[in-house]
Image (tube, helix red, strand yellow):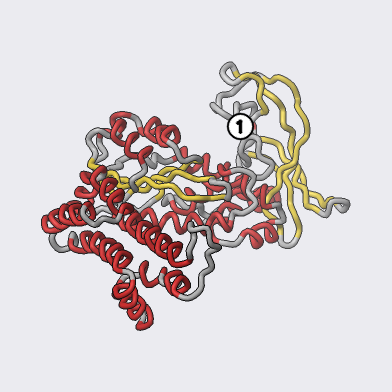
Amino acid sequence: MRSVRVWARLFGVEQAVVEGVEFDAVEQVVVARVRVARGARRRCPFCRRRCPGYDAGVRRRWRALDLGVVRAVIEADAPRVSCRVHGVVVAAVPWARHGAGHTRAFDQAVAWLAVHAAKSVVSRLMRISWRTVGAIIARVWADSGAAVDRLDGLRRIGIDEVSYKKGHRYLSVVVDHDTGRLVWAAAGKSAATLHEFFDLLGPERAAAITHVSADGADWITTVVRRRCPNAVRCADPFHVVAWASDAVDRVRRQVWNAAAGRGTGRRGVAVGEARLVKNTRWALWKNPDNLTGAQRATLDWIAKNHPRLHRAWALKEGLRYVFTLAKTSPTTAVQALDQWIGWARRSRIDIFVDLQRRVVRHRDAIIASLEHGLSNGRIESVNAKIRLITRMAFGFHSPHALIALALLSLGGHRPQLPNR
């Protein structure tokens, strides 16, 4: 009897009786023959109600954690029961999730490894394929996510999208500003995708949200305005300054094309002055405090030879300074923003005239960001980690396993090793 309890503990079986243990020389695996304890028999795997039997089913095996260097499995009958709610289903077993071919302890160990180790380490150590790892992660997250309410108590959130695959495949993500945790993610980048989050949140909790930070994407603005009427919408400073950086680069390309003779019927080649303009990109993009000596000399050359391009750079820096000023004086920053809008409107640079129209369209959200000091900095940090997880998760069959791994890693409820 003592050895039976030892084997049950080694294999991690609960509410079960170990009938015998043998070594299968053909498959090189230790097999524990088990029967479910009387109190846990004939239960529906979904509602856990005791149900009448339907048939004897088949004999099944579940992969358990290795015993030393040898693979181990649990073998038991898998009868079917007739649940009045869920119909005819395979009866639940205490040591594994419904539909899984691995024990709960095995799933838990794999999920912990997937969060902390590279995919090659997980696959080789546990002797399973990487797609199997993805299926296990999805199962573990389904249990972990159901056990906690990640959306409870949300007040300040950030919304963004992150690319996870070539071909414009995106995840929409929501982060809690107060905890820095990833609270929700879904495949897609559209208003319909974001509506799924607010449907899950519910109207009462959506009304309790006070601040929402996001970039200037219209699909986010439209949904937030409709579903979070009480929230203050804050434009992310990084994205607003990125608009200006992109505008400077477009002006640079105009100057470059003109210097190379493109659009005049001649074949444009980046030589001479055109090559010099082409190589000004980093000097125009970088913050003045981070410029090298050569890049400062490049800016001086631009100011002397291409004043329109230099004026575009000054406009970009002026918009960046607005957000720098907000750290010490939000009121002065709002005044500086209005002055910048007037400056861009009179700049006679069509690209920046269009940009100031965009800034005016999002002026309320930008002012809210200046006054409340809210940005997507936390979200960009989470996105960087999701990109790393994406590289680790390369080979998953679907984005659902990637989302589960991201939520396990960044959702504040990391899996624990079994019996720890």
In which quadrant of the rendered view does residue 159 lie? top left
Q: Is residue 62 left or right of residue 193?
A: right
Secondary structure of the residue carrying tag 1 is helix
Q: Position of residue 148 (x, y in %)?
A: 41, 41
Q: Is residue 237 above or below residue 92?
A: below
Q: Residues within 10 Å of mark 1 (few under 14, many from 20)?
A: some
**Could you say which is closer to the camera, residue 131 or residue 224?**
224
**Could you say which is closer to the camera, residue 53 or residue 359?**
359
**Type of residue at label 1?**
Ala
Residue depicted at x 82% and y 52%: 23
Q: Position of residue 156 (x, y in %)?
A: 28, 45
Residue depicted at x 13% and y 60%: 329
Q: Total label count? A: 1
Residue depicted at x 36% and y 80%: 292
Q: Is residue 23 visible?
A: yes
Q: Position of residue 313 (x, y in %)?
A: 30, 65
Residue assigned mark 1:
40
Q: Is residue 205 visible?
A: no
